[in-house]
Image (cartoon, rainbow, N blue to C red):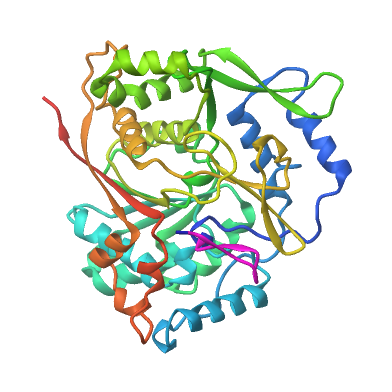
Amino acid sequence: MLSRSNSTGKLFPSIFNKLKVTPNEPLAPSFQALFSTHIVGENPILVRDFIHSALYDRNHGYFSQRSGAVGVLERSIKFNQFEGRKAYMKQLDKIYKQSGIAWFTPVELFKPWYAQGIAEAILRTTNLSVPLKIYEIGGGSGTCAKGIMDYIMLNAPPRVYNSMTYTSVEISPALAEIQRQTVGEVRSHLAKFKVEQRDAMDRSGWGDGEQQPCWVIMLEVLDNLPHDLIYSENQVSPWMEVWVEKQLDREGLSELYKPLQDSLIKRCVEIMELDKNNTRHNTFVSTSWSKLFPKPRRSWLPTGCMKLLEVLHAALPKMSLIASDFSFLPDVKIPGERAPLVSTKKDGRSSDYSNYLDAKGDADIFFPTDFWLLERIDHYCSGWLKLQKDKSSQQGKKRRTITLDTSSFMEEFGLPSKTRTKDGYNPLLDDFKNTKFYLSVPTHNIK
């Protein structure tokens, strides 16, 4: 369970979120007003487009406005030297204050052990008779890449390391350069590592794709991908897609509801409701109850995740996938299933918005991952799961998938003894109850 820390103004252990950097100065009011005008013009836009602009627009997006050093620890934390949780948290607080960084990723705080657990999972699962190819989406500071390559160099047969390639797909030019420096600390890694500075969701960037088996790693990527929002007046009314428009004669924004028409939203809705359609019972009772006590419904859809997986499965048809992220978030004020936490930081303290429309370049927007839905989307994008309206006779590839709590994953593939304090407390295993790992590997063609 995440908890608040008054001393640092951060979420713990929200280090599991992507790197976030504290701004040097708060946004000026004039900038915020300008942002609304630029994001939403005379025509309404889908919620996913609003979120994408609020986070990633080059001129006024949240991540574009953040400046400062990247969260890289000078040396690994010696967990075995701490008496227990109190001593560890004190040291963590000291690290944050000295660095001036708002967030560190777990692969950074638990280096090299976190990355080595991922490397071990890959080595146990991959076919070592073919060259090992790894892609990482959003490689951060390069700590994961270096940790994995270090582990393979030291623990795999020499031919595996000598023939491997590791490609980081990174949209940030600043982070791309830091990744090259981090991995380059081991000279032999450089010939096997490269950074492609591009958007992983752009299919054209993948060229002809990769027809050989490969691995894709996504650590804390899903939480910041754009989502769509759908709305229903009650439990029996049809879903409607939500658009964002400017209020007449005002600077504020409001929602506009339209019948489902966007193809990405429609496919995501059908995937989401497949299980409900198959397991629905007492329909008459629930329908009557809904009419007596109507209650609006709001549901957030991971359409950004769906678009990314569609691109990856098309470009890398034989890929295996490892993804980690939040499975739930506490204290979320935004209504709806799978609703995001919208958080800003002012005067060193974090505060959360109760309306996502208030995020105008000054707030992070991050979502919990519904791992059941992620699995269904993965199966659909691979071509295995067919929607009811999909009459295609083309057979896809069946995939073997598993979702594990972070503690279970690290106990199976990592070295938990390396992150344990003297009294037995282990932050890697004990603090991340709201995070999971998702593993997905291809098996065989369905005949």
> Is 420 or 118 nearer to us in this picture?
420
> Is 276 or 382 nearer to us in this picture?
276
Asked if residue 307 is positioned above or below residue 142 in the image, the reply reads: above
Within the magenta stretch, is there residue 6? yes
Quadrant location of residue 94?
bottom right
The x, y position of residue 235, in whole percent, is: 44, 19
Looking at the image, which residue is at 17% across and 54% down? Answer: 129
The reply, left or right, for residue 37 in relation to residue 174 is: right
Asked if residue 127 is positioned above or below residue 141 in the image, the reply reads: above
Asked if residue 338 is positioned above or below residue 27 in the image, the reply reads: above
The reply, left or right, for residue 271 in relation to residue 46 is: left
The reply, left or right, for residue 432 in relation to residue 389 is: right
- Residue range in magenta is 2-13
> Is 179 or 294 nearer to us in this picture?
294
Looking at the image, which residue is at 37% across and 68% down? Answer: 430
The x, y position of residue 421, in whole percent, is: 38, 83
- Whether residue 76 is visible here, answered yes or no, is no
Asked if residue 436 is positioned above or below residue 13 in the image, the reply reads: above
- Whether residue 355 is visible here, answered yes or no, is yes
Viewport quadrant of the C terminus: top left
